[in-house]
Amino acid sequence: MEFRYLGTSDIRVSAVGLGTWQFSDSWGVQEYEQAKSIVEKAIEVGINFFDTAAVYGRGLSEQFLGKALKELGVREDVVIATKLPGEFLSRHDVLKGTKRCLERLGTSYIDLMQVHWPPLWNNFPTCEYMRALEELVHQGVIRYIGLSDFPVELVDSAWSCLSTEDLVSDQVRYNLVERDAEKEIIPYAEAYGLSVIAWSPLAKGALTGKYTPDNLPEFKDVRRGSALFHPDNFRQIYGVVEVLKEIGDKYGKTPSQVALNWLLRTSDTVIVIPGAKTPEQVEENAGAAGWRMTFEEWLRLEEISGRVLISRVVW
């Protein structure tokens, strides 16, 4: 496994982490033993970075992750990242929400607390919630502060509110066919020493090779109605998948592993957090690290994916 520093912190995390949104009714891992087997396999293959959130399954993801790490006896060996949603960003809710996260995770501290999204429907001042998070660092219950789904203007604004701590990360959507993060966020992160934590790094499964233009099932989970799987969009995506398969055949790698490897090679700031519903998928994801495609192969994917235009106007 490859490791990268989390921003300018002293924490080294696996370049491939484990996202746990799927430990909820949104993706379908609702049995604890199944979730534990996924976490156990992650530890076995060298993953030490686990990402969850208060809203995933209304706390179920945090509960499953915390219980599994405790039973496996590895809490001190891993890095837990969780998130408070935009609705929880008044000062008293930041404090209360963090307490609830600690309780569900069964831990006395959280390594990385992230603001899940800006308070778009509420009028919480930015400095109110950022200073509350800074207070929690001083209290020793969170170690570092990060953001999620913040554009660079709001990252700047949030960072300016901190007096003694620094931001270490911004978690954003980033994959081979949804590359808008490259326009502003990744250059900003490289300039200021932030990690970019890439969520949906496999485009909700569109890059795995599991689906074809003639085999797009009616999804019953969070992919229902996703623009990625609209036939007009997926026909373009599938051209990228075919190249992923071709490159993967050369290295004995799957399309998923090649797609994740491309992200890791594109910028040293990037950490990927693919989800997994089985231990086998965890092992496959971990295989994205520890090897390197050629520049020519990277460029070929750069060029073909750069021609993909995902339209979200599908109705």
Image (cartoon, rainbow, N blue to C red):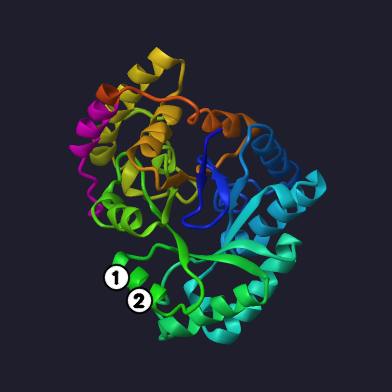
State which quarter of the image contains the C terminus: bottom left
Q: Residues within 10 Å of mark 1 (few under 14, many from 20)?
A: few
Residue 64's disc is: none
Residue type at numbered disc 1: Glu
Residue at figure coordinates x 56%, y 46% from the top left: 13
Mark 2 nearby-residue class (10 Å; few <14, some 14–19, many ≥20): few
Magenta-drawn segment? 298-315
Q: Is residue 270 magenta?
A: no
The residue that mark 2 highlights is 157
Residue 247 image position (x, y, % from top left): 35, 19
Amino acid found under the numbered disc labelled 2: Ser
Quadrant hosting residue 281: top right
* Horizontal side of residue 297 vs 170, given as left or right: left
Please give the residue where the numbered disc 1 appears in the rendered image.
153
Q: 270 or 190: which is nearer to us?
A: 190
Residue 97 percent location from the top left of the image: 62, 75
Q: Residue at x 50, y 41 (%)?
A: 15
Kindly indicate whether the residue at mark 1 contacts the one at mark 2 (C-beta within 8 angstroms).
yes
Task: Please tell me which residue lies in front, 32 or 291.
Answer: 291
